[in-house]
Amino acid sequence: MANPEHLAMPRKGVDAWNEWRSQNYYTQADLSRADLASADLRDADLHHVNLNRANLWGADLRDADLRGADLTSADDQYGQLCRCDLRKATLTGAGGSQYGGVYIFQKLSGTVMRVYGQETSGMTHEEIEAMQRKLQDIVEKHTTQNNAHTMKVLGELAKKVGASTQTVFPDIIQPGKRISTDAAIPELAHNIHFALQTASMIDACRTAAKNIEFAERALAGTRRAQFWTIIAVVAAIVTAIGTIAMAVAVLVIL
């Protein structure tokens, strides 16, 4: 559950929240399961904030700093995420079924969509599948006798897909701080898998966007055709009325 003290701050406004964050930089803010529906969080400093299962329905998060934030299973349906920074953010299950297809493309338009520091959005579908097969092959061939080799090939693959080679965990001696160290084989494989999942999602969004653009052009063409058809019909009616009027006038004269 959300920390009551932390939860009270965003309700005072973004300025008050950001000031509190700057004064408590090393405190990991806990807004898990918080009800932030329709909240105005534009430009909010939400880096490394725990938003697990938070209700962000309709929240305005434009230009927000969400680096490293935990958005696991957060409900941000109809929320605004334009231009927000999601580097290293955890998005597993976020937005429910809405986090897919064209919806995510519309929501993240202009967003810094990066995974563990490096962009993955430039990978094609074929490249992503090849990397996934390579990851599976590395994991299947791994044994306790070839740890060094596995770490080497996983490290090389991580660099190619933009995955982190580090793992981060809380510092139990200094609460609120985090320690990063070289990731072990399971964490490294997980980081690569997550990076490839995100790249696949972005590739699907790119394809959906192209389909939408094509459909919009086709619809615009149809509307133009309908407009000129209506103009032609109106012109024909006016011409017919004029012809009838002339005929009536001739009959009257005769």
Image: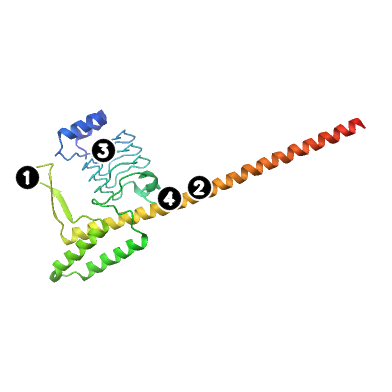
**Structural crowding at the residue carrying mark 1, measured as other residues with C-alpha within 10 Å and reported as few (<14), some (14–19) or many (≥20):** few
CA gap between label 3 and label 1 equals 27 Å
From the viewer's perspective, is 220 left or right of 206?
right
Q: Nearer the viewer, mark 3 or mark 4?
A: 4
Disc 3 crowd rating (10 Å Cα; few below 14, some 14-19, many 20+) is: many
Q: Are marks 3 and 4 in contact (CB under 8 Å)?
A: no
Q: Which mark is residue 94?
A: none
Nearest to viewer (mark 3 / mark 1): 1
Kindly identify the amino acid type of the residue bearing the numbered disc 2. Answer: Glu
Q: Closer to the N terminus: mark 3 or mark 4?
A: 3
Percent x, y of residue 145: 13, 71
Q: Nearer the viewer, mark 1 or mark 2?
A: 2
Way the structure is coloured: rainbow
Of pointers 2 and 4, the one earlier in the residue sequence: 4
Q: Is residue 179 left or right of residue 65?
A: left
Residue 251: image location, x then y, percent: 89, 33
- Kindly state the secondary structure of the residue where label 1 is placed: loop
Q: Which residue is mark 1?
A: 173
Q: Which residue is mark 3?
A: 34
Q: In the structure shown, which secondary structural element does the residue marked by tag 3 occupy?
A: loop
Tell me residue 193's x, y (percent).
26, 59
Identified by mark 3, the residue type is: Ala
Q: For the point 16% across and 50% down, which residue is it?
A: 168
Look at mark 2 in the image and give the residue it sits on: 216
- For the point 82% across and 34% down, the residue is 245
Asked if marks 2 and 4 touch (Cβ < 8 Å), the reply is no
Q: Nearer the viewer, residue 189 or 71?
A: 189
Q: Earlier in the sequence, mark 4 or mark 1?
A: 1
| Secondary element at tag 2 | helix
